[in-house]
Structure formats: structure tokens, C-alpha cells
């Protein structure tokens, strides 16, 4: 585990967070056409229903993750849920369980808000992300939240204990 990494709530408009999200956006743009990227903007990440965390290594942001609290819908049998968004870890620090710690922090926030279901959409070509989510206990499911099954997206869920 990375003991030199601190995971803490942060504003999505912090300059270092903005830079990290820019790196994530560039990575996603290299994989998929823009209409296939389901990205929350900085403004959307500042909305009250979004919980945003940053991973800090001393004075530098090295990772991000967010969860958006959502009302129930037909695809969740009316159950409210949290949608994991904007997961990113600096390429040079991957493999140190930073992303798993971010996911765990986000899930703890969902549980604290009384939500027992976490969902996410990720790209089929993001193999490391898919492995991460599977290691964290997520399993594949169908689309939710207005997403369509475009052949590029994978949808996953986890029941929070």
C-alpha cells in the first residue's frame, strides 16, 4: 500500500485537479471518439450531489475519483445509487493500489449517505480499469442512467456492505 499517498476530499476546480483531469481526458480521447466519452465537466463535479476525492503525494495530485449520487430509476428497480466517475491515477504511480484506495473512499462516502449500490460505466478498452473494478468487487451489468449499449461501454455494479 502507498503510505505516502493521502486520499482526501478536494474541489474539482483545484488547479492540480484540473491538470490531472486534463490528462485523463487526453487519455480517453486517444481511445474513443468524443461522443463515446461520458465525462463530467469541472462544473458538474462541483454540484452538491458529487463527492470528489484527490490522491495527494506530498504537494502533488496523483489521482482523482468522484461519485455522483443519483435517484432511483427503472434500471435500478427504483433504488438510489452512486455512480463512480473520473477515476484517474498518474501513469508513473499505477500498480500501488491508489485507485483501489480511491474507490474504497468513494464507497465509504456512499455508505455514509445511506446508499448501498455503486454503479459505473467504463470503456471496454480500458483493461486496467476493468481489472481494478473487478478486484474491488464490481461485476458486469446492463446499462443504467440513460447510457446506451454502444459496444464501447461496460457497465458494472457493486452492492455495498
Image (cartoon, grey):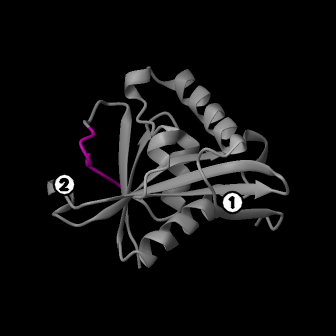
Can you tell which mark lies on residue 8? none
Badge 1 density bin: few <14, some 14–19, many ≥20, Cα 10 Å: some
Which stretch did the figure color magenta? Answer: 140-147
The answer to whether marks 1 and 2 mark residues whose Cβ atoms lie closer than 8 Å is no
Left or right of 33? Residue 29 is: right
In front: label 1 or label 2 = 2
Q: Residue at x 61, y 38 (%)?
A: 21
* Residue toward you, 128 or 87: 87
| Res 90 quadrant in image | top right
Residue 92 visible: yes
Q: Does the magenta segment cover residue 43? A: no
What residue is pinned by disc 1? 97
* Residue toward you, 17 or 154: 17
* Quadrant where the N terminus is found in the figure: bottom right
Left or right of 117? Residue 58 is: right
What residue is pinned by disc 2? 75
Left or right of 1? Residue 43 is: left
Q: Position of residue 120 (x, y in %)?
A: 40, 51
Left or right of 116? Residue 9 is: right
Q: Residue at x 74, y 49 (%)?
A: 61
Specify the principal SS of the magenta part.
Answer: loop
Residue 94 visible: no
| Res 127 quadrant in image | top right
Q: Position of residue 133 (x, y in %)?
A: 50, 55
> Between disc 1 and disc 2, whose residue precedes?
2
Mark 1–mark 2 distance (CA, rounded to whole Å): 31 Å
* Quadrant where the C terminus is found in the figure: bottom left
Q: Position of residue 95 (x, y in %)?
A: 72, 52
Q: Does the magenta segment cover residue 144? A: yes
Badge 2 density bin: few <14, some 14–19, many ≥20, Cα 10 Å: few
Q: What SS does tag 1 mark?
A: loop
Amino acid at each position: 500500500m502507498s503510505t505516502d499517498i493521502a486520499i482526501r476530499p478536494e474541489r474539482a476546480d483545484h488547479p492540480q485537479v484540473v491538470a490531472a483531469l486534463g490528462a485523463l481526458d487526453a487519455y480517453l480521447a486517444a481511445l474513443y471518439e468524443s461522443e463515446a466519452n461520458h465525462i463530467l465537466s469541472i462544473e458538474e463535479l462541483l454540484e452538491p450531489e458529487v463527492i470528489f476525492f484527490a490522491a495527494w503525494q506530498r504537494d502533488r495530485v496523483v489521482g482523482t475519483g468522484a461519485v455522483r449520487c443519483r435517484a432511483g430509476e427503472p434500471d435500478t428497480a427504483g433504488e438510489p445509487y452512486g455512480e463512480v466517475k473520473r477515476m484517474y491515477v498518474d501513469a508513473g504511480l499505477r500498480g500501488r493500489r491508489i485507485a483501489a484506495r480511491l474507490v474504497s473512499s468513494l464507497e465509504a462516502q456512499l455508505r455514509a449517505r445511506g446508499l448501498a449500490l455503486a454503479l459505473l460505466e467504463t470503456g471496454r478498452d480500458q483493461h486496467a480499469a476493468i481489472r481494478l473494478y473487478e478486484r474491488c468487487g464490481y461485476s458486469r451489468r446492463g446499462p443504467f442512467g440513460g447510457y446506451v449499449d454502444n459496444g464501447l461501454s461496460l457497465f458494472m455494479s457493486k452492492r455495498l456492505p
